[in-house]
Amino acid sequence: MGRKGNRIQVILECTEQRKTGIAGCSRYVTTKNKKNTPNRIELKKYNPILKKYTIHKEIKQ
């Protein structure tokens, strides 16, 4: 059975860590309402590898 509604799961990945080339990646899984936010989202989340808050952008699944 399919789910009803406009909520979808998205993956957020750290942009700052990707630029530096440090091994590993900081990723978070969250949900968003596709109808209200059709564009990719950006949130400030904690990166445990860099030990600071960085911008995480939605990546393609």
Image (cartoon, rainbow, N blue to C red):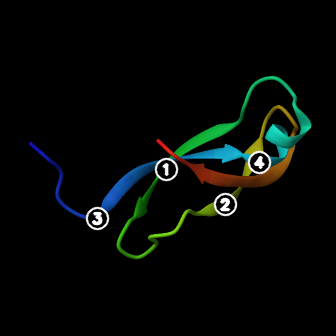
Which residue is under mark 3? Answer: 6
Question: What number is the disc on residue 45?
Answer: none
Which residue sits furthest bottom? Answer: 36
Distance from disc 3 to disc 4, alpha carbons, whole Å, reads 26 Å
Q: Quadrant of residue 6?
A: bottom left
29 above or below 37? above
Which residue is under mark 2? Answer: 43
Mark 1 belongs to which amino acid? Thr
Left or right, 29 with reference to 42: left
**In x, y percent, where is residue 50?**
88, 37
**In x, y percent, where is residue 46?**
75, 46
Distance from disc 3 to disc 1, alpha carbons, whole Å, reads 14 Å
Which residue is under mark 4? Answer: 15
Distance from disc 2 to disc 3, alpha carbons, whole Å, reads 20 Å
Mark 2 belongs to which amino acid? Leu
Q: Earlier in the sequence, mark 3 or mark 1?
A: 3
Distance from disc 1 to disc 4, alpha carbons, whole Å, reads 17 Å
Please say if the residues under marks 1 and 4 sit with CB atoms less than 8 Å apart: no
Q: Earlier in the sequence, mark 3 or mark 4?
A: 3
Distance from disc 2 to disc 1, alpha carbons, whole Å, reads 11 Å
**In x, y percent, where is residue 21?**
87, 31
Mark 3 belongs to which amino acid? Asn
Look at 63% across and 38% down and name the residue there.
27
**In x, y percent, where is residue 7?**
33, 60
Q: Earlier in the sequence, mark 2 or mark 1?
A: 1
Q: Quadrant of residue 32?
A: bottom left
Q: Badge 3: how crowded within 10 Å, few (<14), some, or many (20+)? A: few
Q: Earlier in the sequence, mark 1 or mark 4?
A: 4
Question: What number is the disc on residue 30?
Answer: 1
